[in-house]
Amino acid sequence: MRIQIIGPLEGYGTEAAKMAMDKGAQVFSCISIEESLSNLRQNSNCDLVLVDVSLDIKSFIKSLKEERFYLDVVGCGVKPDPKKAAAAIRAGAKEYIPLPPDPQMIAALLQSISPPPEQSIIANDPTIKRVLHLADRVAPSEANILLTGKSGTGKEVLANYIHQKSKRHKNPFIAINCAAIPDNLLESELFGHEKGAFTGALTQRIGKFESANGGTLLLDEITEMPLQMQAKLLRAIQEKIIDRVGGTKPVSVNIRILATSNRDMLAAVKGGNFREDLYYRLNVVNLALPTLKERPADIIPLAKYFIQKYAKINQLYVKELSITAEQALLKWPWNGNVRELENLMHRSVLLADDKIQPTDIFGYEYCQTTHSTINDNSQIETNGLIGKSIQDVEKELILQTLDHCTGRKNNAAEILGISIRTLQNKLKEYEQNTSL
């Protein structure tokens, strides 16, 4: 993890930096917001910025959005100051930390931004053990690796694990979500641009390829990349050179490519939506992650790991799972896989009074009506599901969740444990079926 600390912080910046470095972070100091932005343009590999609240945080966050820097901003100020804290949060800061810094608070902040990759992989079940065994064998190589599996199975976590096990582990690990970047901006995000290359290109910008030089670049949801961009990516991988948008000379890069997809890539190739030559360039080794339901021996250990993680982040004591909660977790379908489990355990940590009960995890209304109820014999009884297909139940769940979120797709996707792109594809499918 790379952290920038901006501003004087009345001498406490050095103390905060030392705490972060003790946790394995790389820390860089900047005197001003202008210096910070200049550094980011030359190397966008940054995860977190700590900013003195005496500076113009609102203007800084606005500049980050305009220049498409996706990182977390935390306001810092000497001694607790509710007004300054509220102002920083309103401006868009993720958090406010009073100074002098508290070691536990710094540790929890770093944990929430970037959990240690190897601690995040729990592998008791034989299905995931086989995947990790293969990952351990290929990680030290220079081979490009394709990670496939349903949404929420932990592909990015495994990618980070591979990087940490590789010979490049001391160099950057950079991830970019190909589905989250608009098509017209993806080339600039990957390869960078020169000043004046297009409207809004006010300064030179280094892309993800150059930021990852010497390290690993993760192309998340690679099947969402447009065909025209796939051709440019193929050249970059083959020739190990890139062209910045508006640039006049090629730039050499030395990176390893990892890519992920939750789709059937061979079907995408046959359908003409993904280049066959690029597919084989990426798929030197394929690691297929199992669904959470296919690794039942990991459900309870993962649940307990997330309980400890979010209890620490929220500064709460660690609560135990009740027997009925464990039974409910084992019987749940887990359509959102590990991501869904993580979200629900975070919820349960916040809601449970003592031991975590099924209602703390899934909610009273959810447990008692539409989906399932835990009775005194710890058996799950279906209610209103018999006679319906899995597709119909899934559709009903998605539409009801969207209605509950008053149409806010990002919130609905987070609750369902699926990506926003997956939700959009499902809604498009329902709309097409209705119009038939």
Image (tube, helix red, strand yellow):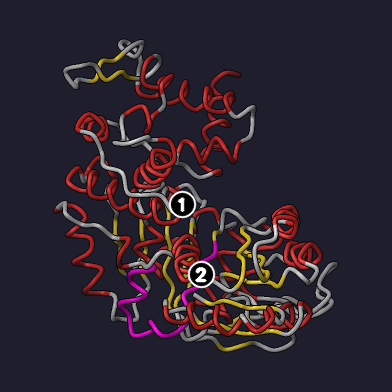
Q: Position of residue 109 (x, y in %)?
A: 50, 64
Q: Position of residue 374 (x, y in %)?
A: 26, 20
Residue range (magenta)? 160-176
Q: Is residue 264 visible in the rendered structure shown here?
A: no
Residue 134 sits inside the magenta stretch: no
Q: Position of residue 47 (x, y in %)?
A: 56, 70
Total marks in image: 2
Q: Residue at x 81, y 75 (%)?
A: 197
On residue 102, the disc is 2
**Label 1 environment density (alpha carbons within 10 Å; few <14, some 14–19, many ≥20):** some
Q: Position of residue 110 (x, y in %)?
A: 48, 67
- What kind of residue is marked 1? Asn
Q: Residue at x 74, y 63 (%)?
A: 61
Q: Nearer the viewer, residue 63 or 388?
A: 63
Q: Which residue is mark 1?
A: 314
Q: CA distance from mark 2 to mark 1?
A: 14 Å
**Label 2 environment density (alpha carbons within 10 Å; few <14, some 14–19, many ≥20):** few
Q: Quadrant of residue 165?
A: bottom left
Q: Residue at x 20, y 16 (%)?
A: 376
Q: Nearer the viewer, mark 2 or mark 1?
A: 2
Q: Nearer the viewer, residue 410 or 116?
A: 116
Q: Nearer the viewer, residue 330 or 29?
A: 29
Q: Is residue 289 visible in the rendered structure shown here?
A: yes
